[in-house]
Amino acid sequence: MRKKVLDKIYNEVKHSLMYCTEGDLPEKTVVDEMFKAELQEIYRKAENHIAKQLKKATTV
């Protein structure tokens, strides 16, 4: 599961860099920040998903 999450983050960051750097290599700090932002987005989505599933399970 961890590899799947890391692959998703990597692909999102790679996709974003392809469109925002215009051929220049980004600074490491930029990539680090993008990685952190994508990881937080995955956490947010996971928390929302879990909350919905728990709500479904408790209302049945």
Image (cartoon, rainbow, N blue to C red):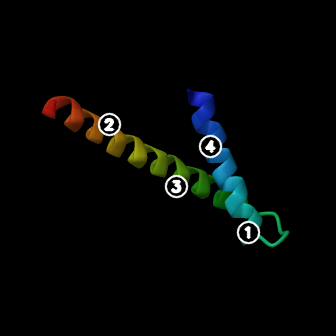
Q: Which mark is residue 19?
A: 1
Q: Residue 4: give x, y in percent of width and height.
A: 61, 33
Q: Residues within 10 Å of mark 2 (few under 14, many from 20)?
A: few
Residue furthest out toward the top: 1
For the point 28% across and 41% down, which residue is it? 52
> Mark 2 or mark 3, which has the lower sequence index?
3
Q: Secondary structure at mark 2?
A: helix
Quarter holding residue 8: top right
Query: Closer to the observer: label 2 or label 3?
Result: 2
Q: Is residue 48 left or right of residue 45?
A: left
Q: Amino acid at mark 4?
A: Lys
Q: Quadrant of the C terminus?
A: top left
Q: Residues within 10 Å of mark 4 (few under 14, many from 20)?
A: some
Q: Amino acid at mark 2?
A: Ile
Q: Secondary structure at mark 4?
A: helix
Residue furthest out toward the right: 23
Residue at image mark 3: 37
* C-alpha span from label 1 to label 3: 17 Å
Q: Secondary structure at mark 1?
A: helix
Query: Closer to the observer: label 1 or label 3?
Result: 1
* C-alpha span from label 2 to label 3: 20 Å
